[in-house]
Image (cartoon, rainbow, N blue to C red):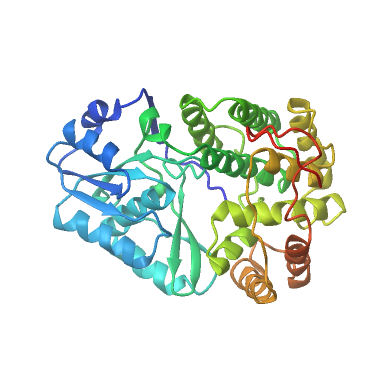
Amino acid sequence: MIADHMWRTRCVILDDGTAAKYIGGMTRGRTGLVVDGHLTGHRDKLLAGNLKGVPVLELNAAPVTVECVRKVGSFIRENGLQTVAGLGGGSVLDAVKLAALFTADPSLAVFAERHAKRSGLLVLPPVTNPKERPKTILMPSTVGTGAEVSAVACLDTAVGRRLVVSRYLTGDAALLDAGHLASLPRQLVFEGLLEAFLRVAGTMIGSYRSIFDDDGHLLIQRIVRLGELLSRNDEPGLSLAAARLSMETHTGWALMGRNPYGAKHWYVANELAYVTGARKMTATASVIGPIWREISQGAAAWGDSARLNNLWGMVTATDPSLDPDPGRGIDELMWQWGIARLPTITEETLVRTTDASIRNWGGGLPMLRGIDAAQIQHVLSEAAGGPNNFAGPHRQSTSGRGEEVST
C-alpha cells in the first residue's frame, strides 16, 4: 500500500561518514540512538561525533513485534527523549517510528491491539497531542522499503502481520549516508531495487490512467538502468543511488493520486512471507510472475493488462534483452538480478496463505476486492509448480557470475 505524503520529510543525502557531523544540527532536546546491533562500526562513528554521550538501544534486525515496540517505547520514556535517531534496516526504522508515535499517544497502541483482528490494514486515528511525539531522524542501512520517508510501518501481532498507517509515521528527517550503505551486499541492493520497482509498477498497473504516468515510467526506467549498471559494476556509490530511487518512490510524483491499494501482489506476498518465515522479497519474487501472467490473460481484478503491457514496454525499451511478454520478462529480470524464490510451497502453506490473504485483505476490504480464494490458490499453485527454478535464457549471465544456464 502507498499513503498520501501529507507530511514532508526533510531528506538529506550525505557523503561517506558525514552523518556523524551533520546530525547534531537536526536534533532537539535530549537525544537517543536506536541501532541495529550488527552495525557497531557505524554506531561508534555516530557516538564519536555529534551523538557523543547519548543513550543507545540496540535491536535485532527482525520483524517488528509488539514487544519490540514496547522496548523502544520504554527506552524513549526512561531517557526522556525528545529526539530519536534510528539507524538500520526497515524493521529498525519501523520500530522507531511506531514507538515514537505510541509514546506520544498511548491510546493508539490500544487502538492497534484492539483492531488488529479486523483486517491486515490499521489506519490509526488522529494523534491527540502531535507535539508530544519525539522527533525522528531515520538513517537507513538497507535499500527498498523507503521506511525513512513512508507513512506506513509493518507490525507483527498475535493475529498476523499488520500494515499500520498514519501521517505521523513519516520521519522528520531522513539521512542517506553513503557510508551506511557501502557495505550492503550487492544481492540485497538488487532486492531493494526490485521492491522499489514493484512498488511503482504494481501501483500503476492497479490504478487508472494518471497525468503522472510519465513520472512513473521514467522512475521505472531509472531503476532498471541502475540495475543494469549494478550488474556490471559493484561500486559502493550505487547503493546510495538505489536508496535515493527507493526514497523517491514515496516522495516523488510517480505515485501521486494513485489507487493506494493498487499493488495487489503485496498483500499475497506479505502473507506468504509471514506463513513461511521467508524474506519479503523472496515471497514477492515467487508470486509476481504468476500474477502478471494472470493480468495478461485478462484477470482484471489483479490489474489492467493494457497498462501492464505499456509499462513493460518502457522496461524493454531500457533493456531490449528482456522478453517482451511481461510475465516471462519479469522472471528474466529477476534472474538477471539474482533474486531468489521459495524453493517449495507446500499444500499447507498454500491453504494458510490463501486463508490469511482473504481474511486480512479480501472480502469487502478494498485491498483484494474482487479476488477470491480460488484466484489466490491458482497464483500460489503456479508459484509452487511453475518457473520457480527459472534460470533465464541460454546466454552468458549478466549478474557477474559468468556461468551459462538453460531453461
Name which quarter of the figure residue 25 lies in: top left
Residue 274 in the image: above or below residue 316:
below
Is 352 or 257 nearer to us in this picture? 352
Residue 236 placed where, x, y %? Answer: 46, 27
Residue 304 placed where, x, y %? Answer: 79, 48
Residue 351 in the image: above or below residue 122:
below
Q: Is residue 405 left or right of residue 22?
A: right
Q: Is residue 396 left or right of residue 111?
A: right
Is 54 or 337 nearer to us in this picture? 337
Is residue 370 among what the camera can see?
no
Residue 293 placed where, x, y %? Answer: 81, 52
Q: Residue at x 57, y 25 (%)?
A: 233
Is 329 or 96 nearer to us in this picture? 329
Q: Residue at x 53, y 28 (%)?
A: 234
Q: Residue at x 66, y 68 (%)?
A: 362
Residue 278 in the image: above or below residue 21:
below
Is 167 or 197 nearer to us in this picture? 197
Farthest residue in the left direction? Answer: 53
Is residue 134 among what the camera can see?
yes
Q: Is residue 23 left or right of residue 406?
A: left
